[in-house]
């Protein structure tokens, strides 16, 4: 038995010897396998990074006058387009989220008319609203629409939104559930009659003369945002940087305008 083991050891050493043709072939095969494995890992890292980057899209990176219209193009062939990926097929089904900051400084502006915050769809904001957000004509309410495969105009109303103060809104979809967060708290949750109907339309911000105030940092996620990410948005606050369209810094961008301090 010892003789057999000794011969096997000698044979293995001979195969792996630099002077052995078989040993050189084995080493070459091992090297090729290692290189292919490293390349595969590298490709996966790059793919995951690209997926991570494309799953979170800045629609508005800065602060703008909410009376001025802005359009975020979705056609990737057009210059400046910020194309939103459709919802991921997560374990629990269709999911996506929109997170943004608002400041309403004059409720009497365009009194009696719906005041546009943003929507994804067509230019007339009808029938495509996937989603759509408006301020109520008279009441202190925020209305959130979502097209579904059962109804075209399902919505929820958020009462008593903060005035003359920055506040954060998150509209989050998971299958038929639409949750609306204000400053990190769920204020409305609705089970929709049908699955949300996504569209390929552009994103319109503050169309139809918008509202009196400011919008800041609008983000899209192709999944239901997590609590840590929601808290991170809250901690960051609205942007301190006005976009070129607005040309001036709103006077309210100090931390005490959106914190409890």
Image (tube, grey):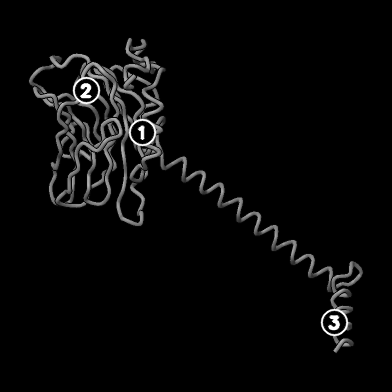
Residue 247: give x, y in percent of width and height: 37, 11
Q: Quadrant of the rendered structure where residue 188 is? A: top left
> Who's the residue at 38% across and 18% down the image?
243
Q: Which residue is mark 2?
A: 162
Disc number at residue 8?
3
Residue shown at 36%/29% (left/top)? Answer: 234
Q: Is 29 placed left or right of 67 in the picture?
A: right
Depth order, front residue of 108/122: 108
| Mark 2 secondary-structure assignment | loop
Q: Earlier in the sequence, mark 1 or mark 2?
A: 2
Foreground: disc 1 or disc 2: 2
**Residue labelled with disc 1:** 219
Reply above or below: 19 against 108: below
Depth-wise, is mark 1 or mark 3 nearer the camera?
3
Instruction: Find residue 133 and report its horizontal and vertical position in percent.
Output: 21, 32
Q: Circle 3 sits in a helix, a strand or a loop, which is it?
A: helix
- 110 to 59, vertically: above or below: above
Q: Nearer the viewer, residue 123 or 163?
A: 163
């Amino acid at each position: 038995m010892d003789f057999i083991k000794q011969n096997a050891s000698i044979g293995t050493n001979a195969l792996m010897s630099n002077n052995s043709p078989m040993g050189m072939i084995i080493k070459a095969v091992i090297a090729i396998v290692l290189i292919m494995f490293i390349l595969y890992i590298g490709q996966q890292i790059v793919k995951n990074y690209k997926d991570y980057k494309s799953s979170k899209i800045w629609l508005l990176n800065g602060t703008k006058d909410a009376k001025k219209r802005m359009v975020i193009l979705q056609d990737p062939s057009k210059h400046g387009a910020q194309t939103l990926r459709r919802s991921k097929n997560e374990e629990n089904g269709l999911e996506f989220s929109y997170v943004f900051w608002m400041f309403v400084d004059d409720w009497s502006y365009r009194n009696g008319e719906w005041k546009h915050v943003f929507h994804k769809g067509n230019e007339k904001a009808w029938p495509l609203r996937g989603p759509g957000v408006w301020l109520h004509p008279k009441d202190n309410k925020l209305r959130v629409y979502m097209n579904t495969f059962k109804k075209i105009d399902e919505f929820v109303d958020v009462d008593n939104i903060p005035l003359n103060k920055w506040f954060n809104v998150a509209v989050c979809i998971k299958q038929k559930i639409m949750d609306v967060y204000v400053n990190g708290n769920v204020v409305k949750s609705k089970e929709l009659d049908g699955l949300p109907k996504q569209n390929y339309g552009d994103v319109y911000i503050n169309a139809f003369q918008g509202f009196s105030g400011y919008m800041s940092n609008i983000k899209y996620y192709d999944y239901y945002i997590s609590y840590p990410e929601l808290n991170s948005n809250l901690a960051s606050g609205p942007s301190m940087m006005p976009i070129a369209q607005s040309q001036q810094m709103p006077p309210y961008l100090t931390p005490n305008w959106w914190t409890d301090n």
